[in-house]
Image (tube, grey):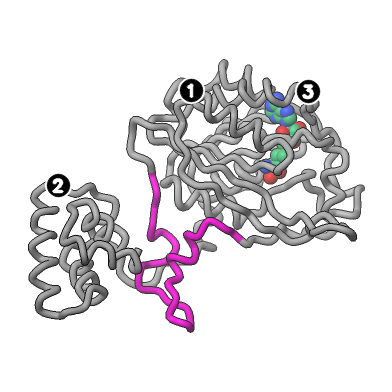
Amino acid sequence: MNYSLYNKDCISGCKKHIEDNSVDLIITDPPYGINGDTLHKHYNRDEKNVLDGYVEIPLEEYEEFSKRWIKQAERILRPGGSIYIVSGYTNLHHILDALKETSLKEVNHIIWKYNFGVHTKNKFVSSHYHILYWVKPGGKPIFNTYVRFSPDEKDNKDGSLNYQDREDVWVINREYKPGKIKNKNELPKKLLIKMIQYSSNESDLVCDMFLGGFSTAHVAVGLNRRCVGFEISESIYEHGIKQMKQVKPGELTSTLRKPNGSIPLNQGKSWSTEELLHLQDRYKNIYQRVGSKGETIKILCEEFGRGRFSITNALNKINIDETHISNLDEYI
Ligand SMILES: C[S@@+](CC[C@H](N)C(=O)[O-])C[C@H]1O[C@@H](n2cnc3c(N)ncnc32)[C@H](O)[C@@H]1O
């Protein structure tokens, strides 16, 4: 079986079942400490379809609880492994404080904009969550830059689809499942697919410390990853584990969009000193010939088998001709 999902508290469960440095990716959505009994009313009016048994963390325990589970997350992640934590705003500071007490390093603060925000009359409608994307230092993180869109793909206004997909505001609707049972705060598959595609490879181990509706587990196994996780509530666990039996490994792979166009050969490889020196020479030669920085970078991308970001970052690093560098910003 390619998953181990336990009906247990995630802190003691991690200690017992997960070795140090063994997990490639953690995606998790802890209780928000805001009274879970009203959480589902934000978007699902039919309460009979919402799973009973959601275990909330009392506000007065939230800070300490966050520190304890995030310490475990740090321990089990492999060096270079990634963690995505979905959080509301109210107790986000506790999660951030807990992360800052670890060796983990921040990569992005992602805003997830969803539909069906909390209905309000005299103030703005709250319609986003925060996703904290951090990595454990000491190893190579996985970031599959071109796994969804190649660098050449454009929209009808000539905007790069790859760039748009990697912006840190994600507009992804919640799933509308009329008549179906779901967890109080079930994450949409599209959101999970995006994190899993960018930050893991097939057969990697993905962990969700708060399984809820088992959505992370479903998507991880559906994309041929292995999965480990915990859910403390017996009734929620029983429902989720039954559903998992119907999930076929790899069943979601055929639904993935395939990037269209070529992917830079050397994507993700680090630059050697020789290559950087060669890049410096080539930049000067080509620029003299074509007289345009954009065109020069395009040619360099082809020659070096790398994307535009990689070329412009490397040029900045080697401190090529100052006047060119200041203008390169427009291409980054
Ligand atoms: C926000 S929900 C997770 C939703 C999930 N991501 C989904 O898409 O359905 C949080 C879950 O954590 C569970 N939980 C609360 N305390 C826990 C603990 N100490 N260990 C494991 N699970 C816990 C709750 O019962 C709840 O189902």
- For label 1, count other residues whose C-alpha is less than 10 Å away and answer few (under 14), some (14-19) or many (20+): many
When the figure is inspected, residue 313 is found, relative to residue 99, above or below; the finding is: below
Determine which residue is flagged by label 3.
60
Q: Is residue 21 visible?
A: yes
Q: Distance between the residues labelled 2 and 3?
A: 51 Å
Dot 1 falls on a residue whose secondary structure is helix
- For label 3, count other residues whose C-alpha is less than 10 Å away and answer few (under 14), some (14-19) or many (20+): few
Mark 3 belongs to which amino acid?
Glu
Horizontal arrangement in the rendering, residue 233 relative to residue 93 (left or right): right
Q: Which portion, as a residue range, is magenta? A: 142-170
Identify the main secondary structure in magenta.
loop
Determine which residue is flagged by label 1.
75
Residue at the extreme bottom of the image, as rendered: 156
Quadrant location, the C terminus: bottom left
| Contact? badges 1 and 3 (CB < 8 Å) | no
Horizontal arrangement in the rendering, residue 250 relative to residue 60 (left or right): left
When the figure is inspected, residue 48 is found, relative to residue 169, above or below; the finding is: above
Magenta-drawn stretch contains 155? yes
Dot 2 falls on a residue whose secondary structure is loop
Magenta-drawn stretch contains 46? no
- Whether disc 1's CB lies below 8 Å from ligand 1 is answered no
Q: Position of residue 207 (x, y in %)?
A: 55, 35
Nearest the viewer among 112 and 293 is 293
Dot 3 falls on a residue whose secondary structure is helix
- The answer to which of marks 2 and 3 sits earlier in the sequence is 3
Q: Which residue occupies 21% across, 66% down?
A: 324
Determine which residue is flagged by label 2.
272
Mark 2 belongs to which amino acid?
Ser
Q: Which residue occupies 47% across, 52% down?
A: 197
Nearest the viewer among 27 and 180 is 27
